[in-house]
Amino acid sequence: MMTMGPIEVSGRDVAITEEAQVGLAHALDLTQVEELDDESSRRKSRVRARTISIKRLSKRELERGRMLFPETEYERPRSRGDCQHGPHAERPCPFVSCKHHLYLDVNERTGSIKVNFPDLEVWDLPETCALDIADRGGITLEEVGEIMNLTRERIRQLETRGLAKLKALGEMAALSDYCDD
């Protein structure tokens, strides 16, 4: 066993063997992947969606909301073709109340509003319409999670649940032949 020159470790000089030095050099090569700046090497912290329950709002808050944002009549797209080619083709999509818009979701049963991106404004979203994403074709669970502000695992769970519902609908359609109309 041949020892090499001293190496400084924690402020002390330590002599290590040639084998250890080769092993250390090999380990350092494996761990030294391209140097990244601090921002890109840290994982982005995801701001969780916020749900606003209508039941928890006071009458004063509801009235203030009605005064700040009065109901106005405006021409909305009626079909996918209107969204793509008509006067409503601008992006980001300004129609936040559309069920395909990614900025917020409204629960029809409870009336609660879920703001998917509370830290962003609508015009800051990279994608605003789920139909635009569907038109592009298949994307990974990771990309869907980023677009919807959900984790990859939650997207996988939703995919499994949706596929099970589609399978159940297919089975129900097969049984409709046996029903009397």
Image (spheres, helix red, strand yellow):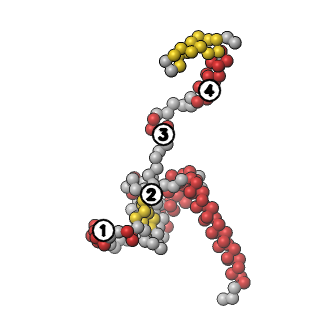
Q: Position of residue 163 (x, y in %)?
A: 64, 64
Residue nearer the viewer, 167 or 23: 23
Image marks 3 and 2: residues in contact by CB distance under 8 Å: no
| Marks 1, 3: nearer the viewer | 1
Q: Secondary structure at mark 1?
A: helix
Mark 2 or mark 1: name the one nearer the start of the chain.
Answer: 2
Q: Secondary structure at mark 3?
A: loop
Cα distance in 3D space between marks 4 and 3:
22 Å
User: In this figure, which residue is indicated by the disc labeled 3?
Assistant: 42
Mark 1 or mark 3: name the one nearer the start of the chain.
Answer: 3
Callout 3 environment at 10 Å: few (<14), some (14 to 19), or many (20+)?
few
Callout 4 environment at 10 Å: few (<14), some (14 to 19), or many (20+)?
few
| Residue 45 visible in the snapshot | yes
Q: Secondary structure at mark 4?
A: helix
Give the number of the disc on residue 49.
2
Determine the residue positioned at 67% across, 77% down. 173
Q: Type of residue at label 1? A: Glu
Q: Type of residue at label 2? A: Ala
Q: Position of residue 111 (x, y in %)?
A: 43, 71
Q: Is residue 156 left or right of residue 85?
A: right
When the figure is inspected, residue 140 is found, relative to residue 97, above or below; the finding is: above
Mark 4 or mark 3: name the one nearer the start of the chain.
Answer: 4
Quadrant the C terminus occupies: bottom right
Mark 4 or mark 2: name the one nearer the start of the chain.
Answer: 4
Image marks 4 and 3: residues in contact by CB distance under 8 Å: no
